[in-house]
Image (tube, rainbow, N blue to C red):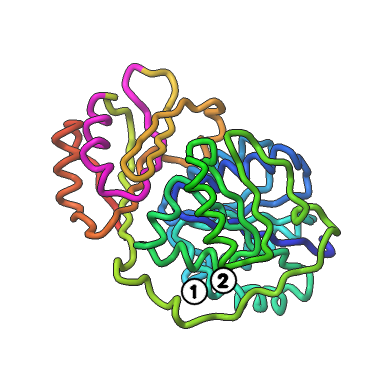
Amino acid sequence: MSSGATLTVFTGFLGSGKTTVLHDLLTQIRSERVGVIVNEWGNLGVDSALLRTSGVEQIRELLGGQIFCSCLSGSFLSTIESLLNLNVTTLLVETSGLAKPSTIRELVEEGARRLGGRLRYQGMVCVIDAERFLKFRSVVNVLNEQVVYSDYFIITKADRTDPETLQRTMHVLQGYKPDAKILVRAGKPIPVPSFLQEGTQEGVIPNPYDPRWAGWGQQGRPGTMTIPLHGSVSREGLNCFLSRIASQTFRIKGVVSVQDEMHPILIEGVEGTVEFLPLEAEEAFRPIGETGITLIWKSPTPSKEQVLQTWIECTGRGDKTIRSS
């Protein structure tokens, strides 16, 4: 049984690059004593499959919600305990892009009580999308909540952003946390930061809960839909469907088998821009169990019937049930 582990949480809004950053770090760390917990808002474990390609074996996933809510917080602590029992000494957590971390202090304190001092919280890292942060934070309250409760920042996509926008983004972060370390990723992996290196710092005490972050703000809770897929779909039909609904979404993510192509493809979409990416390590995706697409909507959320009708018109397939939450 492990004598204890450090816990570092990675948060950040939908499509900010959390999985990419974490994959960078895991590839560099390459330790058998590292454990990872991936929390997905939807019902498909795409991010955990991507992280498996780093070579780290102890990866667990929690689907269908966010760990700072009572719906998953108990399962989260149980998962931590199971990894501690496997002699893991470094725990890294990737939260859902819609994580509301204002209850992090209560969660850390409950973990300390439940695990008998075997867990030391090292802080929260907020991954910031340099291209979209300034735009999204004015309409999606959860972005500001993630920043307020974080202790470190990693700005991604800096190579796609003009210097003025990057400086304005850094200025906003420094306004919230003047002393926080800010790292910038500009198209290539960043070195493992000091706060992930064992023994380099004391544990962090999270900020207490603030009631101003209760609820989801004027936009309400983003709606989520999952289209499970069995068998393949034509690339033309898939293109048609995604192009018609992309502008209504914050995030599109999935793994899809395409007709006349040997391997499945990964779908990555952020606010209207959708990419089809080849799966370089297809075996990592087999544990998902089913291919499909998860959609996280801007307000208002279309009905399942509307989405299904669009799907049928584009792909000719109407035999699948769309799940929503």
Q: Answer left or right for 278 relative to 10.
A: left
Residue 238 belongs to magenta span: yes
Image quadrant in which you'd find residue 149: bottom right
Image quadrant in which you'd find residue 25: top right
The span shown in magenta is: 236-260
Residue beneath the point at 42% across and 18% down: 262
Q: Answer left or right for 302 relative to 134.
A: left
* Closer-to-camera residue (96/75): 96
Q: Is mark 2 in CB contact (under 8 Å) with mark 1?
A: yes
Q: Which mark is residue 74?
A: 2
In the picture of the structure, the residue carrying the numbered disc 1 is: 70
Q: Amino acid at mark 1?
A: Ser
Give me the C-alpha separation between circle 2 and circle 1: 7 Å
Q: On the rendered image, what quadrant is the N terminus found in? A: bottom right
Secondary structure beneath disc 2? helix
* x and y, in percent, of residue 313 in the image: 13, 35
* x and y, in percent, of residue 299 in the image: 25, 59
* x and y, in percent, of residue 314 in the image: 18, 32
* Residue, far bottom: 211
Q: Amino acid at mark 2?
A: Gly
Residue beneath the point at 29% across and 24% down: 235
* x and y, in percent, of residue 74 in the image: 56, 71
* Closer-to-camera residue (39/232): 39
Residue beneath the point at 63% across and 48% down: 59
Q: Answer left or right for 280 relative to 134.
A: right
Tag count: 2
